[in-house]
Image (cartoon, grey):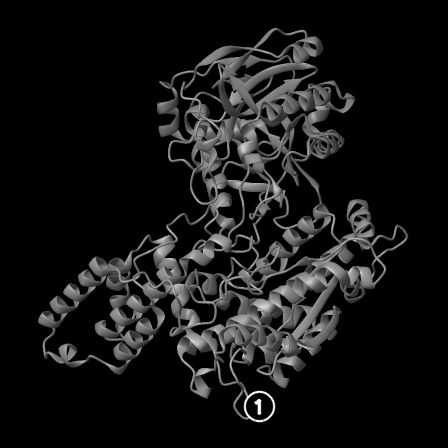
Amino acid sequence: MGRRAKVAVCTLNQWALDFEGNAKRIIRSIEEAKLSGARLRSGPELEICGYSCEDHFYESDTLLHSWEVLINLIEHPSAQDIIVDVGMPVMHKNVTYNCRVIFFNRKVLLIRPKMMMCDDGNYRESRWFTPWKKIREVEEFYLPRMIRQVTGQETVLFGDAVISTRDTCIGFEICEELWNPMSSHIPMGLDGVEIFVNSSGSYMELRKAYVAVDLITMASLKSGGCYMFSNLRGCDGQRVYFNGCSCVALNGGIISRGAQYDLRDIEVVAATVDLEDIRTYRNSLRSRCQVAAGSPSYPRVKVDFSLSSDDALGLTVPTCKTITWEYHPAEEEIALGPACWLWDYLRRSGQGGYFLPLSGGVDSASTACIVHSMCRLVVNYVLRGDTQVLSDVRALVSDQSYTPTDPKELCSRIFFTCYMATENSSEDTKNRAATLAEQIGSYHFDINFMSVVNAVLFVFKSVTGKTPFYSVQGGTPRENLALQNIQARLRMVMAYLFAQLMLWVKGRPGGLLVLGSANVDEALRGYMTKYDCSSADINPIGGISKGDLRGFLHYARRNFDLPILEEIVGAPPTAELEPLVGKKIAQTDEQDMGMTYDELGQYGRLRKQLHCGPFSMFCKLTQTWSKDCTPEEVAAKVKHFYRCYAINRHKMTVLTPSYHAETYSPDDNRFDLRPFLYNNKWTWQFRAIDNQLKELRLLSTGGESSKKESGAVRKYSTMSRESSGGPFGMVTSNRPGGVEV
């Protein structure tokens, strides 16, 4: 009696519209699954065309080429004597569905469309796909002529059905169906489905890996059965990083799993399951049995094949035991995730490396350390014998004989850093930048471009006859801001100049990609100059908070042997755009912003995660900060934040594409869709806060709160007036790069 079935889940690093590369990776995963002894292979969502095709899903070419790849898979010798489940878009009756296509021995068994779309976060599936609404119903699907010629079939079942083999029953979920409260695995399990196959396109967010794992374990715990979860991994052309974690669960426990962060394009995880364990577990759940006895049936597609061995030899195959899932701490996730994302982007872009303006502060140091982490990963995989990584790095450095053995040496070839000084830069930051560059191994140089700044100002003076001054020299806020912005913007111009020509100087082909280093908190506040060094090709830390970056640098100091990071973390953050006082920094970020980075993080989470407007944020923070702030002080802080947010929101429309990591990211491209022109006075909302303050004063026992129109309130009010020019505050702000039209 056959009872022990071996199944395989596959993690693939696919690339949108790379049909040839995607097909090769799928075929290799099938080959590896067969070598492991698996008789059922499942892959990630939309693996044939790539998940992030987006509006290319409207094109008939995308559907056509997906069918062409499917033919190659069906005909391939490696895809015989194994049930294969692949993902692709399929049009049925002029409606496009996100589908799983299951085939076996040159026959298509079933086309199973996705039944629940994902439209939150970065997902927009309903823009391109329609959910299948006919529960437990199937229709005839007329196969394209090219498929008919290969399979000899004219039609195949399309819809919500399951597959019955000689020894078990297989059902299918696609990504969001697992997350939905009415998941398909519940009714399928009640109808006798023993193996659930979920194909996913799930991306990472810091501290969120447990979510999918908990859902998978609970699905198999509640329903009983074997749950197979196959996920994408890597950057397939977008801001997100698909985070792998493909796994197999049985009756509430993980029995096999893949890596979350990895440079491998293909990872196959196999598991041996005793089907009798599923049956005895379910039979012991008496309330489940009572419900199952009356559950409606799914249409079944029968296939004359077994997932288990037909002889007694199959009983000798050891089954997999439950394992404990070890999660990466957040600082390790920052070291690994963005590094893998940068590697994918670099090798697929065809460029020769990265260029970073290195200021000696926390943010640019974090970006530099992530690139260093990338180099460490690459060397590690090359030393482990990964031929794909070696091939990619050789193409990158234009040397087919090169084999990296030292991360610092590799870093010197593909990572260029530059300290860009003006008369406002300090020796402290210059030395910190140089020391960090030496410790990570980047090719580093420093320049002083004050002559360029003066040349631009000379043009302005020649045209207007006016000379702007800094505030400390008696200038107005507008003059002060303009003088800071011209330095910041010229840094961006210089960065792109060197990025385009440094490989030419080195006698190598290609150019360098410019890296940004603005964190998620500064983007939320708008604390950046529009079109300065925050404008780059990509930004690995744009979705990470200042607090998490500090934690990451402590991690990097310990694990990468970078002692200078202790000094960098301890230094006050500064833009160094205003004159020094006694050759020391007088300007600090938190003073400029009028709020701390910790406060910014709380504002961001309340605004995005808890969906708070100004009034709701005030109400929550009066409780959260009750020990440290009076309600009047909380009101002033909230109003100041929302004024700054409104004035600077337009900057998000040109925000450098950033690695998505944080759930309160203000990325305007798809994750945080809001206006970029606000009435920054928030008259109705702020009046609601003021009315609430009056009620709180009436409720106060001693009337003390009514007397505390504190210095903090006056301070924030003054700052806000300085920040708002014109009816919508669309002229300037209290920080370099405030709002300019």
Question: Residue shown at 47%/75% (left/top)?
Answer: 589
Instruction: Categorize mark 1 by other alpha carbons within 10 Å: few (<14), some (14-19), many (20+).
Output: few
Please state which of residues 562 and 592 is positioned toward the viewer in this rendering: 592
Compared with residue 263, is residue 185 higher up or lower down, i.e. above or below? above
Q: Is residue 307 visible?
A: no
Residue 473 visible in the picture = yes
Viewer-side residue, 681 vs 603: 681
x and y percentages locating residue 408 in the rendered image: 77, 67
The quarter of the picture where residue 551 lies is: bottom right
Query: Height in image: 696 above or below 336?
Result: below
Residue closest to the eye, 280 or 100: 100
Seen at 70% across and 73% down, the residue is 561
Amino acid on which disc 1 is placed:
Lys
Element assignment for label 1: loop
Q: Residue furthest bottom?
A: 582
Identify residue for label 1.
583
Looking at the figure, which quarter contains the N terminus? top right
Q: Is residue 499 left or right of residue 89?
A: right
